[in-house]
């Protein structure tokens, strides 16, 4: 069965873009229902995550991902600044591979610790010690995965999160002299969205 991991990112956008990331994820999950695609988060999302990982699987996964890869536009009033004139908010979507990050972080530099899952998540959070905390010793970065049903799967997702965290840290350290990583590497084109959603219910316009 085809399985693809989607990375949704607010890039260097403001709080509104982080708010949009969580709601675009919900829109994708909603759109997958009743089709030959299963779409689920790899973590319990906050209300305004800077980035989010979704797992897309099923016979139609490749087509589903292809139609959503690129820049996503939400048109609506800022939930935080009601008088703000801006109405267009952008996030980026791109597939990432669990096996494509070996050059970024070495396993020898990561400490994995099994732990009991905690926090919200309902039936999707494991009640056994299958959750994993991954610590990258050279940088001190820590990532936790608890949504997967096995420790092995959580270990892979935690490692992927470390890769993404390291990339974000490198870009933050580079400062204004360099463009944001998403703009450069993932093709976030603000003037050319692949999908547009509108209104508080995040309904697809095109």
Image (cartoon, grey):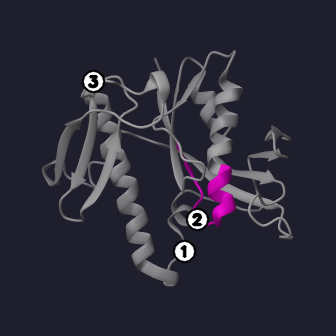
* Residue 17 magenta: yes
Q: Is residue 36 left or right of residue 180?
A: right
Residue 166: image x %, image y %? 35, 61
Q: Residue at x 64, y 30 (%)?
A: 29
Q: Residue 149, relative to residue 13: is it above or below? A: above
- Crowding at mark 1 (Cα within 10 Å: few <14, some 14-19, many 20+): few
Q: Residue at x 54, y 18 (%)?
A: 58
Question: Helix, strand, or loop for circle 2?
Answer: helix
Q: Residue 31, relative to residue 59: is it above or below? A: below
Q: Is residue 110 visible?
A: yes
Residue indicated by mark 2: 183
Residue reaching furthest to the front:
119
Q: Tell me if label 1 and label 2 are in contact, CB under 8 Å.
A: yes
Cα–Cα span, label 3 and label 2: 40 Å
Residue indicated by mark 3: 128
Give the label, 3 or 1, closer to the camera.
3
Question: Helix, strand, or loop for circle 3?
Answer: loop
- Crowding at mark 2 (Cα within 10 Å: few <14, some 14-19, many 20+): some
Q: Which mark sits nearer the N-terminus, 3 or 1? A: 3
């Amino acid at each position: 069965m085809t399985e693809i991991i989607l990375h949704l990112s607010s890039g260097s956008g403001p709080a509104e873009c982080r708010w949009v990331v969580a709601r675009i994820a919900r829109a994708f999950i909603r759109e997958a229902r009743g089709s030959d695609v299963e779409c689920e988060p790899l973590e319990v999302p906050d209300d305004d995550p800077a980035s989010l990982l979704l797992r897309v699987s099923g016979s139609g996964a490749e087509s589903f991902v292809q139609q959503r890869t690129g820049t996503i536009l939400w048109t609506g009033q800022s939930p935080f600044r009601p008088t703000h004139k801006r109405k267009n908010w952008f996030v980026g979507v791109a597939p990432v591979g669990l096996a494509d990050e070996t050059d970024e972080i070495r396993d020898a530099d990561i400490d994995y610790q099994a732990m009991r899952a905690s926090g919200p998540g309902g039936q999707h959070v494991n009640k056994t010690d299958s959750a994993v905390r991954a610590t990258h010793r050279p940088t001190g970065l820590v990532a936790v995965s608890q949504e997967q049903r096995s420790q092995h799967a959580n270990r892979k997702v935690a490692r992927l999160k470390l890769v993404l965290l390291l990339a974000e840290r490198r870009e933050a350290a580079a400062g204004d002299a360099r463009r944001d990583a998403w703009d450069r590497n993932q093709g976030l084109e603000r003037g050319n969205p692949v999908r547009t959603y509108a209104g508080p219910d995040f309904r697809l316009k095109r």
